[in-house]
Image: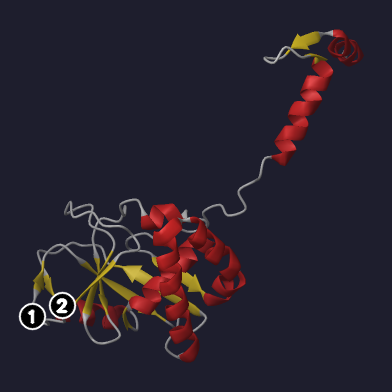
Amino acid sequence: MLKVLIEMSENIQVQLSNGRMMTLKDLVMDYERLLKKVPKDDNPIISKLKVGEWFRIDREIIAKKMEEIHYKCNEAGEAGQSLWKSFEESNKIADKNPDQYPNLMETYIFEHNWEYKTEQEMRNMCKELGDGMCDEIICDLELQMRICNGENINDLIRNFDELPCVRVIELRNGGTGYFGGGVDSKSYHLPAVLRKFNFDPFFKNQYHTPYAFRRNFN
């Protein structure tokens, strides 16, 4: 039966849209060759950032994929190129401070289940859970890790963040940063956007949530 089908495919003529005639067998063979040329997704999403779960940052993986990250940033236009400059600066600071930014770190987004927290209370929460509140360097490392994990850079710089709350971070200069998020409060922001303010320990924050990190974990 198989032999008969093969012989039939060799005799059946198919007319293409351009008027060209070819056998069904040759058409199938061309289609198979075309499928082999279709590039596969080498970066399926490995791990996504989620509320209430630790997210791992591996700086060795980031270093290995640095050229790929650079290429994707350049391909994303002016916004991507600006993000790459931020990555470069943050990576230099991280390299100079390995004790503060080791090869392996984890970050954690608190689930927002309170009426409000003061900024000082948020910082205390992060110290109680881990090693403190994330800063802008860790945020840049997180974004790079997300690209390494297969997230599309255009989703980070052009599409609204899917996370429910804006994340509160502690800037290296002691100030307060607001990072991405905001779906629940309808204050939509891009995932890669960081806004900077002065630290007010008594400011009652109703809608945002703290962003913690830890260096030592099992």
| Image quarter of residue 55 | bottom left
Few, some or many residues within 10 Å of mark 2 (<14, 14–19, 20+): many
| Residue drawn at the location 15% of the way across and 77% of the way down | 119
Q: Please name the colour scheme applied to the rendered image.
A: secondary structure
Label disc, if present, on residue 119 of the rendered structure: 2
Q: Is residue 13 visible?
A: yes
Residue at point 47%, 53% (across, down):
152
Q: Residue at left 42%, top 88%?
A: 100
Report whether 72 appears left or right of 42. Answer: left
Figure quadrant of the N terminus:
top right
- Proximity of marks 1 and 2: CB atoms separated by less than 8 Å: yes
Q: CA distance from mark 1 to mark 2?
A: 6 Å
**In the depicted view, which residue is nearer to us: 78 or 15?**
78
Comparing 147 with 215, the one in front is: 147
Q: Is residue 40 left or right of residue 210?
A: right
Residue 26 versus residue 108 in the image, above or below = above
Residue 19 versus residue 34 in the image, above or below:
above
Residue 124, compared with residue 22, is above or below; it is: below
Relative side of 94 to 39, left or right: left
Between 9 and 121, the one nearer to me in the picture: 9
Residue 218 x %, y %: 49, 78
Residue 196, image x, y percentages: 22, 74
Say which residue appears at 23% left-offset and 54% top-offset.
188
Task: Please tell me which residue lies in front, 185 or 196.
Answer: 196
Q: Position of residue 186 (x, y in %)?
A: 18, 51
Look at label 1 and name its amino acid: Phe
In percent of width and height, residue 143 lies at: 42, 66
> Image check: 170 left or right of 144?
left
Q: Upstream in the sequence, badge 1 or badge 2?
A: 2
Mark identifier at residue 202: 1
Mark 2: amino acid: Glu
Binning the other alpha carbons within 10 Å of mark 1 as few (below 14), some (14 to 19) or many (20 upward) gives few
